[in-house]
């Protein structure tokens, strides 16, 4: 019934299929990482949201890494709806999203650096995108420190003034008492002289 396929025909068909799949993969299955903002500046204690929208063939594997000078560490890896594995150091501060985005709360100065997201698709190919985060010290913390210092200095100055006033009062009191004690003697000597 079926026409017998020659070995070379099978090879041709499989070659054709692979090329078709390859072209289709290029057109449809290419990994894309869209991100509206790649450079962000925040203050200490703020939180940052690295917004990306990942699309690829099958379920993507999303991995975030941090790099700064000599430091390089993994933040977390997840597959939306399958598993989420955030590094212990980041567990309290990181929020993961199914579109690949990552939120990092309670920023510290050491969080400043380079953040890289790597997306791996079902076929094993991957693509990455980098973000730069700058973290500024907060000004109001300095101001708070300054105002606390001023209050402390004010209180100390007040105490010092109070001490001086009390000392002076005590001194005057003592002087007056001594004068009173010396008065009769003086009277006596004065009387003797007379
Ligand atoms: C990713 O998802 C989050 C939460 O649903 C959303 O706020 C954010 O805008 C999305 N990012 C992009 C680039 O679409
Ligand atoms: C999470 O990742 C760490 C290494 O990054 C690994 O040692 C650990 O086994 C992983 N945990 C789970 C539940 O996959």
Image (cartoon, grey):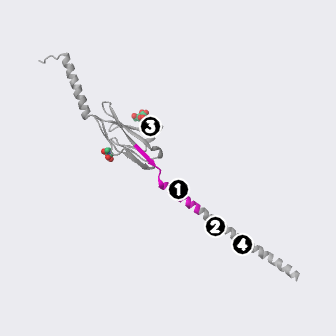
Report the mark closest to the observer, 2 or 3: 3
Give the residue displayed 72% in from the left and 70% down from the top. Answer: 171
**Horizontal and vertical percent for residue 183?**
80, 77
- Decide which of tag 2 and tag 4 comes sooner along the chain: 2
Query: Which residue is labeled 3 in the image?
Result: 73
Q: Indicate the quadrant where residue 79 lies.
A: top left
Which residue is at the front of the view, 60 or 17?
A: 17
User: Of helix, strand and loop, which one carries label 2?
Assistant: helix
Give the residue displayed 23% in from the left and 26% down from the top. Answer: 19
Q: How far apart are marks 4 and 3 (CA)?
A: 72 Å
Q: How far apart are marks 2 and 4 (CA)?
A: 15 Å
Badge 2 density bin: few <14, some 14–19, many ≥20, Cα 10 Å:
few
Q: Distance between the residues labelled 1 and 3?
A: 33 Å
Q: Quadrant of the N terminus?
A: top left
- Decide which of tag 4 and tag 1 comes sooner along the chain: 1
Q: Distance between the residues labelled 4 and 1?
A: 41 Å
User: Of helix, strand and loop, which one carries label 3?
Assistant: strand
Decide if residue 10 is on the left or right side of residue 48. Answer: left
**Horizontal and vertical percent for residue 45?**
45, 50
Q: Are marks 1 and 3 in contact (CB under 8 Å)?
A: no
Instruction: Write down the region rendered in magenta.
Output: 132-154
Report the mark closest to the observer, 4 or 3: 3
Which disc is residue 145 wearing?
A: 1
Q: Name the magenta segment's main secondary structure.
A: helix
Which residue is at the front of the view, 173 or 168?
A: 168
Which disc is residue 162 wearing?
A: 2
Q: Height in image: 166 above or below 9?
A: below
Query: Which residue is labeled 4 in the image?
Result: 172
Give the residue displayed 33% in from the left and 33% down from the top. Answer: 126
Report the mark closest to the observer, 1 or 2: 1
């Amino acid at each position: 019934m079926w026409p017998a396929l020659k070995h070379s025909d099978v090879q041709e068909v499989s070659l054709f299929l692979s090329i078709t799949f390859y072209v289709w993969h290029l057109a449809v299955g290419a990994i894309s990482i869209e991100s509206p903002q790649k450079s962000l500046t925040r203050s200490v204690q703020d939180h940052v949201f690295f917004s990306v929208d990942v699309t690829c063939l099958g379920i993507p594997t999303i991995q975030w890494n941090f790099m700064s000078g000599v430091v390089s560490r993994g933040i977390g890896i997840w597959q939306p709806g399958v598993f989420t594995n955030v590094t212990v150091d980041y567990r309290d501060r990181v929020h993961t999203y199914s579109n690949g985005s990552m939120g990092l709360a309670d920023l510290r100065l050491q969080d400043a650096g380079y953040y890289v997201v790597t997306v791996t698709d079902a076929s094993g190919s991957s693509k990455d995108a980098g973000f730069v985060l700058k973290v500024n010290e907060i000004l109001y913390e300095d101001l708070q420190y300054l105002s606390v210092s001023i209050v402390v200095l004010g209180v100390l100055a007040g105490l010092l003034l109070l001490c001086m006033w009390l000392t002076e009062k005590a001194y005057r009191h003592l002087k007056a008492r001594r004068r009173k004690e010396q008065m009769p003697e003086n009277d006596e000597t004065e009387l003797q002289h007379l």
